[in-house]
Structure formats: C-alpha cells, structure tokens
Image (spheres, rainbow, N blue to C red):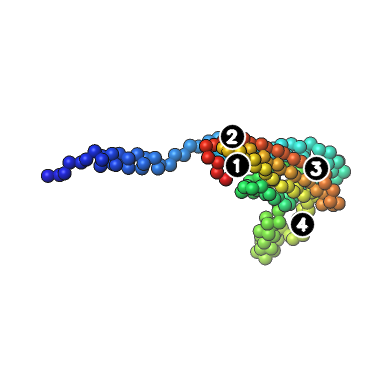
Amino acid sequence: MKPARTPGLRLVAVLVVLVMAGCGTSVQRMDTEKVKDLSGAWNDTDSRLVSEEMIEDVLSQPWLRDFTRKNRAQPALIVGGMRNLSHEHINLNTFVADIERAMIRSNKVQFVASPTERGSVRAERKDQDLHAAEATRNPMGQELGADFMLQGTINTIVDVSGTKQVRYYQVDMTLVSLADNRKVWVGQKKIKKLVKRSKLRF
C-alpha cells in the first residue's frame, strides 16, 4: 500500500512547478527604430539620435561649401580618436559606424579606412602584387589621403538621490583640417535622463 501524500508534499510539488515555469525565457522582437529604455544607460537610441544631429550640423557648416568650391571635389574624412570618458561601457564602434554610414549616404563627403582597417586592405594589395593578374591588380601608393579628421569624446555626470538618478551625457566632436590643424567644426550634443527605480544599481 502506497503511503498517502501529505498536504505539505503537494504544496512543495506545486511550488517547484511554478518556479520552473518562471525560469523560462521570453523573447519579443522589436522594431529597431523603437525607443526602449530599460536601465537608463547609453543605448542604441542615444547613439542614433546623437549621430543624426551631429551629422546634420557638420554637413550644414561653411567648411564643406568652401572646400568643395575650392577643390571641386568631395572632402575625404577619417575617424581619429573617439574616447569614452564616461562612467559606463559604451560601444564606440556602433556610434562611429552610425556616423560614417549617414555621412557617406549624404553623398557630400567620402570616408577613408581607419588605421586598423587599412592593415587588412594593404595586406590584400600586397597579396595581389604576387598573385593577381596584372589587369586586375591594384598597385601600392594609390590610396586616397584624408583631408579632415573627425575626433570626439563622450562624458557623463551622474547625480543620485535615494531611488532617483539623473544621467547626463555630453558628446563633443571636432573636425580638424589635416593640412593646417584648423578646427573647422565643433559639435556638441547633450542628453539628460531621469531614472527611477526601487533599488538603484550601478
């Protein structure tokens, strides 16, 4: 004869089932343009909004018109030092990619490869010297030199009081002429977020 199950054992069994059900993973696909702030930290929306505003500003300034008129050609740009001076991890690669993509699509400027990207390109060109047919070979010494360098920093200030937190982001960018070190454009974008939660975590 099987022993009768006690109410306590039945309760434990129900709790185990509920806990296991709660451990399941739920995934919901979202529109990439939809704004969704979860933690209050820098996210893809911040990267997109900042890059869009910076690009609109830099392409509307006199330096572009003056260069195009004088040289009858689009200026070539290169991304220099982009530094994250904030208190949190920010993926600068996606931010820089947003800027490069939008500026190239404007059809007003050109971008040359960064120092890290040039390494693999030069290795391929060197390989072509040895193995590619002469008619399809791309020779050394024909690279497009940059006319301007784009540099920038991201800084933050965090103000905390109890369960409330204000996150302030400031993005500063500068466009420098490689011919004479002139700063032809200086841009700035500020973002401020109020974060409320029951327990603040950093």
Identify the image quadrant of the N terminus: top left
Proximity of marks 3 and 4: CB atoms separated by less than 8 Å: no
Sequence-wise, the earlier of marks 3 and 1 is 1
Judged from the image, the secondary structure of the residue bearing numbered disc 2 is: loop
Find the distance from the CA under tag 3 to the CA under tag 1.
Answer: 28 Å
Which residue sits at x=70%, y=38%? 190
Query: Residue 63, relative to residue 178: is it above or below?
Result: above
User: Would you name the residue on which mark 4 appears?
Assistant: 142
User: Would you name the residue on which mark 2 appears?
Assistant: 35
Front position among marks 2 and 4:
2
Q: Position of residue 26 (x, y in %)?
A: 44, 39
- Residue type, numbered disc 4: Gln
Considering every residue shown, the one lying at the far left of the view is: 1
Q: Which mark is residue 185?
A: 3
Q: Residues within 10 Å of mark 3 (few under 14, many from 20)?
A: some
Find the distance from the CA under tag 3 to the CA under tag 4.
Answer: 28 Å
Query: Can you see residue 125?
Result: no
Q: Position of residue 58 (x, y in %)?
A: 77, 40
Q: Residues within 10 Å of mark 4 (few under 14, many from 20)?
A: few
Front position among marks 2 and 1:
1
Q: Nearer the viewer, residue 139 or 49?
A: 49
Sequence-wise, the earlier of marks 2 and 1 is 2
User: Would you name the residue on which mark 1 appears?
Assistant: 41
Find the distance from the CA under tag 3 to the CA under tag 2.
Answer: 29 Å
Front position among marks 3 and 4:
3
The total of numbered circles placed on residues is 4
Find the distance from the CA under tag 2 to the CA under tag 1.
Answer: 13 Å
Judged from the image, the secondary structure of the residue bearing numbered disc 3 is: strand
- Residue type, numbered disc 2: Val
Front position among marks 4 and 1:
1
- Residue type, numbered disc 3: Trp
- Residue type, numbered disc 1: Ala
